[in-house]
Image (cartoon, rainbow, N blue to C red):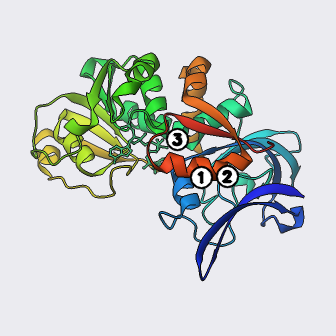
Amino acid sequence: MFSAIVIDKNDDGQTVTLQQLDESQLPEGDVTIDVAYSTLNYKDGLAITGSSPVVRKFPMVPGIDLAGTVTESSHPEWKAGDVVVLNGWGVGEVHWGGLAQKARLNGDWLVPLPSAFTPKQAMAIGTAGYTAALCVDALVDWGITPDNGEILVTGATGGVGSVAIALLKKAGFSVAAVTGKPSEADYLTGLGADKIIDRAEMSEKGKPMQKELWAGVVDTVGSFTLANAIAQTKYCGAVAACGLAQGADLPATVMPFILRGVSLLGIDSVMAPKAPRLKAWDRLARDLDPAALETIGQEIGLSDAIDAAKKFMSGEVRGRYIVDVNR
Ligand code: NDP
């Protein structure tokens, strides 16, 4: 038997409970894993609170990522004892996920735990941090260098934003952080932010073309904030868009694209192929100071995760929740 959070649905709505399950109930897969740590991502918050139809199959064990040790494998790449990391691939949405002591997955979805990190540190990074690395890779691969100017990061105290700031700083960029939590200015400057911008300055409808301020942008919130960020991006700059914390809409015009050559780079972590995944984890292993993880992550037990998800969705939480699934 093992412990797992289970989301179910009946005529009265959605239920979320901590349950004891039998290993025989695990879904199909060629690799079985003893999970050490998972995390709460924004998507897990949506799934557990039921505030968005993230879960597409019931009953579902949520948790879009995990780190743990392989116990059984018929996949050629993995053997018992390997320590692995999983991000995305619909896990926690259509396939049982990481908020459990055991998981059974498709071995093609796994990457090796980078030697720079413990399983706990990998989950302090989680899908949020891995997505931040995908965003930074996208801007750098686009050709943006520190000489081009500052990078704007929105949703700065969130999981993606926090790690993006730390990675950008390490890569030599000057970083402006947009936050709705002015009280967290020290946290953000500690991570590497050079400038703090009040969220209110970005989150209302603005002009289609504004003063050119940013060489690049990592946007985690969408909506008017993303529209304003695009309108403030310098000639031939790029905006990596990965999130929708403010909204899924994009009330913008094409003017910055056609008059300034600004590019909008879409970032998806869920179905990203293996090469960019490994590249993103390489960047994290190389550039993320483990000390930064101490300030970004706070540990909770599996039994705390349901309540924590509700708090998380209220937008009050700073950084990331790491879930020790064995307590
Ligand atoms: P968090 O909840 O940790 O952070 C989101 C941050 O956005 C908050 O901390 C807050 O930061 C800011 N925010 C919250 N509400 C609003 C609002 N109404 N208007 C403007 N800003 C707001 O989430 P994550 O960092 O984990 O994820 C961020 C986004 O990225 C989410 O939308 C998530 O779904 C998405 N995502 C996408 C992935 C992909 O593959 N494309 C993968 C992972 C995440 P502050 O108070 O500092 O302003």
Q: Secondary structure at mark 3?
A: helix
Mark 2 highlights which residue?
109
Note whether ligand 1 is within 8 Å of mark 1.
yes
**Mark 3 and mark 2: Cα distance apart in space:** 17 Å
Foreground residue among 55 and 234: 55
Residue at 61% from the left image edge and 23% from the top image edge:
294
Q: Residue furthest bottom?
A: 11
The amino acid marked with disc number 2 is: Trp
Regarding residue 113, the answer to whether it shows in the image is: yes
Is 251 located above or below residue 37 in the figure?
A: below
The amino acid marked with disc number 1 is: Gly
Is 207 located above or below residue 117 in the figure?
A: below
Residue at 15% from the left image edge and 52% from the top image edge:
254
Note whether ligand 1 is within 8 Å of mark 3.
yes
Local crowd size for mark 2, using a 10 Å CA cut-off: few (<14), some (14–19), many (≥20): some
Q: Name the quadrant where ligand 1 sits.
A: top left
Q: Nearer the viewer, mark 3 or mark 2?
A: 3
The answer to the question of whether label 2 and label 1 lie on touching residues, with beta carbons closer than 8 A, is yes
Regarding residue 273, the answer to whether it shows in the image is: no
Q: Secondary structure at mark 2?
A: helix
Left or right placement of residue 98 versus residue 310 in this view: right
Foreground residue among 290 and 108: 290
Mark 1 highlights which residue?
88
Q: Nearer the viewer, mark 2 or mark 1?
A: 1
Mark 3 highlights which residue?
128
